[in-house]
Image (spheres, rainbow, N blue to C red):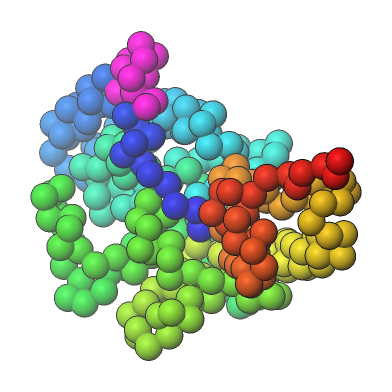
């Protein structure tokens, strides 16, 4: 799960003329929706107008961050990503046109999809469980009092709860091993968001092995070998925010941080080694 600084991103995409128009359309739609007095008329309005208003926001976000799901970190080629309402509109209709509630999502995380790993259907859909006392907010000012179960990619603390095994499976970060609530949130989110879909697990396992192979190759070549530069560049590309499963890549590389050059890469200081004279 990649951490997204959504507030900063929204300020960036709304700053120009097109972005300002998109923001104004959201505001007008929100005002119209607020005048609907029952669930049926609100749903009818959202079905007719929702996607047209939030799809331009998705297009601008993916232009900046790449076509990658914020939840699963899978890169989508040749298929559409969607705007997921982190708090679903069936419970939080008043956040339907609030861009701070938007998360770019793949269908595996957002829509009902089979998960053979658990023999059940995953995908968030309209699910939004709360931790006790499970008091659902009815206005924006109450959101901070809610205790959501589903991990939020726009919350750094939530992203920090996830780690990965060598076989690619997402697990609770060992730093939080004694936190029962953190364990519940990770376990439930893994199922609800399809984070451990077998295809994703297999891709992360390959990534773990590829990084280990590259680290061994670099060590074998020595610090000044010309052949080391393209390997370092390949590792760097895996860590970039647009790369698929970049959070897992960083976690797997951290397993080798006892090597000084790995620590440099993790801290953004890694450069191609100097050429010998």
Q: Where on the picture, by quarter, is residue 66?
A: top right
Observer-nearest of 179 and 200: 179
Picture residue at 86% right of the left edge, 51% below the top: 225
Name the foreground residue: 142 vs 266.
266
Most common secondary structure along the magenta stretch: helix
Res 106 seen here: no
> Which residue is farthest front?
277
Residue 227 in picture, x, y percent from top left: 88, 49
Which residues fall within the magenta stretch? 12-23
**Residue 14 is one of the magenta-drawn residues:** yes
Residue 151: x and y, percent? 40, 63
Name the spot of residue 73 as percent of width and height, x first.
58, 53
Q: Residue at x 20, y 63 (%)?
A: 146
> Would residue 41 appear left or right of 273 to someone viewing this image?
left
Q: Position of residue 34 (x, y in %)?
A: 15, 34
Which residue does the image show at 67% across and 59% down from the upper left? 261
State left or right for residue 149 relative to residue 221. left
Let me know if residue 18 appears in the view: yes
Does 154 sit above or below residue 9?
Answer: below
Res. 194 image quadrant: bottom right
- Residue 258 belongs to the span the image colors magenta: no
């Amino acid at each position: 799960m990649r951490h997204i600084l959504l507030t900063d991103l929204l300020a960036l995409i709304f700053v120009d003329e097109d972005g300002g128009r998109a923001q104004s359309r959201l505001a007008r739609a929100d005002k119209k929706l607020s005048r609907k007095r029952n669930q049926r008329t609100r749903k009818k309005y959202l079905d007719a107008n929702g996607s047209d208003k939030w799809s331009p926001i998705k297009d601008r976000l993916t232009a900046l961050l790449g076509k990658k799901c914020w939840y699963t970190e899978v890169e989508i080629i040749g298929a559409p990503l969607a705007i997921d309402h982190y708090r679903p509109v069936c419970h939080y209709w008043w956040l339907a046109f609030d861009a701070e509630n938007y998360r770019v999502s793949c269908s595996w995380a957002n829509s009902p999809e089979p998960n053979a790993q658990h023999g059940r259907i995953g995908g968030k859909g309209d699910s939004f469980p709360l931790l006790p006392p499970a008091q659902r907010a009815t206005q924006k000012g109450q959101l901070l009092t809610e205790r959501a179960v589903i991990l939020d990619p726009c919350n750094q603390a939530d992203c920090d709860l996830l780690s990965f095994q060598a076989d690619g499976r997402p697990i609770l970060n060992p730093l939080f091993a004694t936190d029962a609530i953190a364990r519940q949130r990770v376990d439930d989110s893994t199922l609800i968001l399809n984070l451990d879909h077998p295809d994703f697990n297999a891709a992360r396992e390959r990534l773990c092995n590829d990084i280990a192979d590259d680290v061994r190759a670099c060590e074998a070549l020595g610090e000044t070998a010309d052949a080391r530069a393209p390997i370092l560049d390949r590792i760097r590309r895996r860590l970039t925010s647009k790369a698929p499963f970049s959070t897992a890549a960083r976690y797997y590389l951290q397993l080798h941080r006892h090597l000084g050059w790995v620590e440099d890469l993790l801290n953004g200081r890694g450069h191609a080694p100097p050429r010998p004279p």
